[in-house]
Image: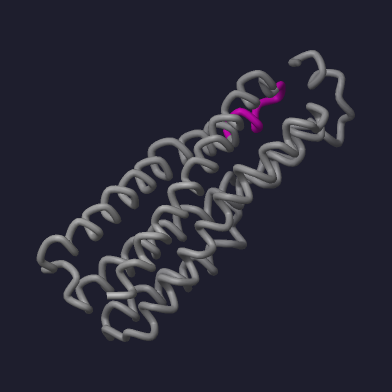
Amino acid sequence: MSDVIAKAPPEVVRPQEAAGPIVPVRGLPVVAAVIAGLVAAIASNSLWALNFLHVSCGALWTAIDLFMGFVIGPTLARMEVPARIALTRRLMPQMLLIMPTLVLVTLTTGWQLARYFGYLVLPYPQRWWLAASYIVVGVMAIVAYGVLEPANISVLLELRKPRPNALLIGRLMRRFIFTAGVTGVMQVATLVIMTRIATW
């Protein structure tokens, strides 16, 4: 597979394309605006703002995880190696900004909403549902920051080398796609829990 990379067309594998910053600088103002909105929502204790951020970012987190795991993953598996690397080179820098921001905003606003509605002091058996949501969301956060982001960064660093290791990139991408799919399935479990809590 490494030989395929070495013989691929220059426009697919040339290292100059990856010579810029790992993080897409043009996306930083968007991330800063979202974080500023999060801080403003918490500071003002605005129910509408907290709901908007929680629902929108949570929905995007779920959709992206499912899309990566069940659409992008099978598509990458069927692509030629040079095309796979070209797509990875353009996709992963965006994910480096998008996913941590969505995770941070979703979890923070979720906690604030639980505090707002008094869910943090619920009696049992209702509290079991809340505990289940903490466990599921906690595992998803650990996967996002402990597995997905390290794999993402490793892929980006490998792509910056003059001769990227296709075997390593493929292994890291499979890990990224698989864990994203697992997280997406866990998101569905979260939706079940959240809709149950909303009907109390």
What is the image's colouring?
one colour
Q: Position of residue 162 (x, y in %)?
A: 71, 24
Which quarter of the figure is the C terminus placed in?
Answer: bottom left
Q: Position of residue 118 (x, y in %)?
A: 17, 75
Q: Position of residue 96 (x, y in %)?
A: 53, 48
Q: Residue at x 86, y 25 (%)?
A: 8
Q: Residue at x 59, y 36 (%)?
A: 156
Residue 138 in the figure: left or right of residue 180: left
Q: Is residue 40 above or below residue 137?
A: below
Depth order, front residue of 146/131: 131
The region drawn magenta spans: 157-163
Residue 120 magenta-highlighted: no
Q: Is residue 141 above or below residue 14?
A: below
* Furthest residue in direction right, as rendered: 9
Residue 162 magenta-highlighted: yes
Depth order, front residue of 155/14: 155
Residue 200 in the figure: left or right of residue 24: left
